[in-house]
Structure formats: C-alpha cells, structure tokens
Image: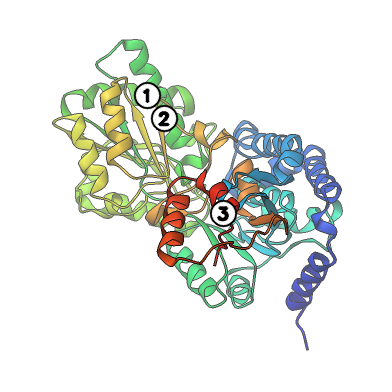
Amino acid sequence: MLSSMEKSIAELRETFKNGGTKSISWRKSQLKALLQLINQNEDSIFKALDQDLGKSPVESYRDEVGVLKKSVTYTLSCLEKWVAPKKAEVPLLFFPAKAEVMPQPLGVVLIFSSWNFPFTLALDPLIGAISAGNTVLLKPSDLAPACMSFLVETIPKYLDNKAVKVLAGGADIGERLLQLKWDKIFFTGSPRVGRLVMAAAAKHLTPVTLELGGKSPAIVDTLSTTPSKAKVTAKRIVGGKWGPCTGQACIAIDYVLVEEKLASTLIELLKKTIKRFYGENIKSLKNISRIVNKHQFQRLVNLLKDPNVADSIVYGGSVDEEKLVIEPTILLDPPLDSEIMSEEIFGPLLPIITLKNIEESIDFINSKSNPLVIYAFTEDDTFKKRILSETSSGTVTFNDSMVQFLCDSLPFGGVGQSGFGRYHGKYSFDTFSHEKSIMHRGFYPEIEPRYPPWTDFKLLFLKLAYQFDYFGLILLLLGFKRS
C-alpha cells in the first residue's frame, strides 16, 4: 500500500503526464499566484523570519521578499521568449534542412531548501521549476520551523496543489525522499549533505544541482588609495560579512586578505563601521540576526575557544547564549591550521589574514577549495585579470559584496567543492529544462550517382565537405549519398 508521500509523488507524476503544466498560461498563472502570495503575506513572512532567525523587516525585505518579487516579475516578463524554440544554424552540407532547439520540462523535480534564507532559497528555485513547466515537491528546512510551517500552510492556498506540493519534516523525511526516483533534484545546503544527495541521485541517474558554500575571501587592495574609497571598502565588507543573516550565508565574506602594512588601517575602519551599523554593546545590538540554534551557536563558540584563535581576537568576541547572539568579531592572523581557517565559518567571525604583497592572495586562495565567490577590492586592472585567469570560483565580484546574488542576468552557482549547476533568471529556467535538438529535412532532392562510385574520389569530397561547409552543395549536386 502506498504511503501518503508516495501518493503525493504519484499525483505529481500524473499531473505532469497530463500535460497541463506545459502550457504558458498555466505557468504564468502559477507565477502570478506566487507573487500574490508574497504580496498578501508580507507581514507574516517578516514575523516568521524574526521568530526563526531574528531578522529585522529591512533585512527580511532586502534578502527575501524583495528578491522574490523581483525574480517573479522578471520571469513573467521573459517567459514567452524563453519557452519559444530557438532556430539553430544548419551546415550547407545538410541542405535543404532547418533545425531548432526546444526547451522542455524535465518532469517531477525535488527541491531541498536551506534555513538561512528560508523563503528565497525555497521559492526562487520554485520559480524556475514552474516557469520551465515541471511539477514540484518542495522540502523546506526544519531548522527554520516557523518559515517551514508558513510554506506548508500557505502554498496550497495559492498554487495548484496537484502540481506543487510542500512537505514538512526533518532529516528522516529527506532521506526517504532521496530513495525515490526524481527527474531533477535541486539542493541548497552543506557539502556534507550535498554528497549524500549526489550519491542517492546516482542510483537513478537523476541530474542534480548542488548549491553549496565554501570559504569566500575578500581581497583588499584599495586602502592605499583615497580615504573615501577605503571607507566604502570597509562599509561593503561589513555589509557582506554581517549583513546576510549575520554571516550565516554561503555568499558571506568568510575571511579577508590584506597587506600587513595596511591591516591596522582596515581594522580601525571596520570597527567604526560595525559600531555605526550594529552598535557597540552585545546587549544592545541592532539590525543583526541571531544564530539559528544552540548547536550552531556552540559550534561557533568552540571556534573561538581555541587558545591561539582567542589570542587573535582584536574586536568583539562576546556571546549571549540566552539570545543566541554572537557579537561581530574580528580576528587578526589566527593560525592557518586552525578550524576557523580550514572550515567555512558560517557565522559572525571575520579572520583577517596578512600578506607581504597582495598578489600573494592568489596563491593563498588556490591553496584552498574553490570558493563560491571571490570579492576583490582593487582598481588595478592587471591584478583583476590575474584574479580572473588564475583562480577558480563560482563568481568574482569587484569592489562590492553580495550584489551579484541580486542580478538576474548573471548565473549563480559554484564550482568544484562549492557546488555545480546554476540558477537565477533565465538560468533557473534552463536548470529545470531539457533542450531538445530538432532537425527537419525534406525528401528531395535525392540524386543517385551517375558515375562509378570511386571510393577514393568520394572520400576526398567528403573531407572537403567537412572542412569547408559550402562543399556540401557540391556533394549534393554530384549525387553523393551520406552513407
């Protein structure tokens, strides 16, 4: 007898089989309904985010509600163009013929979202899956229970419940889902769980997109320019470290690389900016999220308990266990073999690593796993080119932080240990689509050879035909067959 989970998935498969999700009208109606869900429940979303993560309304709108509204609106404006088959060039060798590439939905897809951006990381992939014409099962993270409950209760009121389903539960539910066959799995989370997802998908040869994380560095090479640019650099580093869920984000700055002679200048600028943005006392911090749960809180506290790491603290370090808050903390040259420098921090601790020369940052970054993002504050075009050509990362952003995530025209995704696959805007549509190649040929003209089939002669013309496309016409006129 089928379980309720298996019945839900069977209904998704039947809905996809019936073809209703393939129509542009259905896709648009679901996207408009999703936009309506966000608009009509903005206060409830703010409340859930505050309950789970202590996010302020400003942070919640910037990183969640605003991102989703922009994504849905952009997708609606482009959908018909994306769905339309695209003409493809056909070599003259195949004349007369025409070809096209037609995007088609993959089928029934499974989306695992993460707790740090419980709405964005659940609904942004959903936007892509719906726009591509798939049916979807969404599994939100149970580590953000209020947000998970909101999604489970609210989505069926707005979206087609036969095509889009939301399933609550913990790791046990996730494990059961991975045992089943899917047409696509989209996962956002840690590399550890990502490996489990990939291993499970391999059993069914299911395509996977893994949005993971990594130690994303910020290279600072602007402090010796004008004072105003140095201040902007510090402001954008602070925003890119503590702004996104107090550092609990895959795109947050993990550590900073700066020349030794400029480290004290950077630290003073960071201190002033932190005080202005968030306050000076842990008891009265403002506009900053809390750590998601006691387990993650204790993990971060343990990083600071290493005596050599504790000795490197130059600002902050206070903790409030009751409120699960850790003060923005700056560390100067903690041991490179310590856990804080070997694992992704995912919290409000910022190591600053000093170098003799800023160009050494390239070798430093290459000594570690591929980062999701490299942030580089520099006006040196030669150095920019070296960063782009000599490092490997999902994204490179010059002279700012986080903004790349908000740009629908850019793909978002990792490389190597930071994940693979991409989404956002058209890239989300592509991620959940199969591009089918289509060739149209006619039956005529079909000319039989009028001379002895000299093999060497025919081989010569075949070689010329593949080397110079226009010789295809000559082949046709001479009556050479393709086999």
- Look at the picture and state if 320 lies above or below 205: above
Contact, CB < 8 Å: mark 1 with mark 2? yes
Please state which amino acid type lies under the numbered disc 1. Answer: Ala
Label 1, label 2: how many angstroms apart (C-alpha)? 6 Å
Mark 2 burial class by Cα count in 10 Å: few <14, some 14-19, many 20+: many
Please state which amino acid type lies under the numbered disc 2. Answer: Val
* 99 or 287: nearer the viewer: 99
Quarter of the image where one finds residue 109: bottom right
Label 3, label 2: how many angstroms apart (C-alpha)? 71 Å
Q: Residue 119: percent from the left, percent from the top?
A: 65, 47
Query: Which residue is disc 1 drawn over?
Result: 234
Q: Residue 470: percent from the left, percent from the top?
A: 52, 43
Query: Which residue is disc 2 drawn over?
Result: 238
Secondary structure beneath dot 1 equals: helix
User: Residue 118, can we see it?
Assistant: no
* 59 or 412: nearer the viewer: 412
User: Residue 62, can we see it?
Assistant: yes
Please state which amino acid type lies under the numbered disc 3. Answer: Leu
Q: Residue 478: percent from the left, percent from the top?
A: 56, 54
Q: Which mark is residue 478?
A: 3
Tell me how many marks there are: 3
Q: Residue at x 41, y 30 (%)?
A: 238
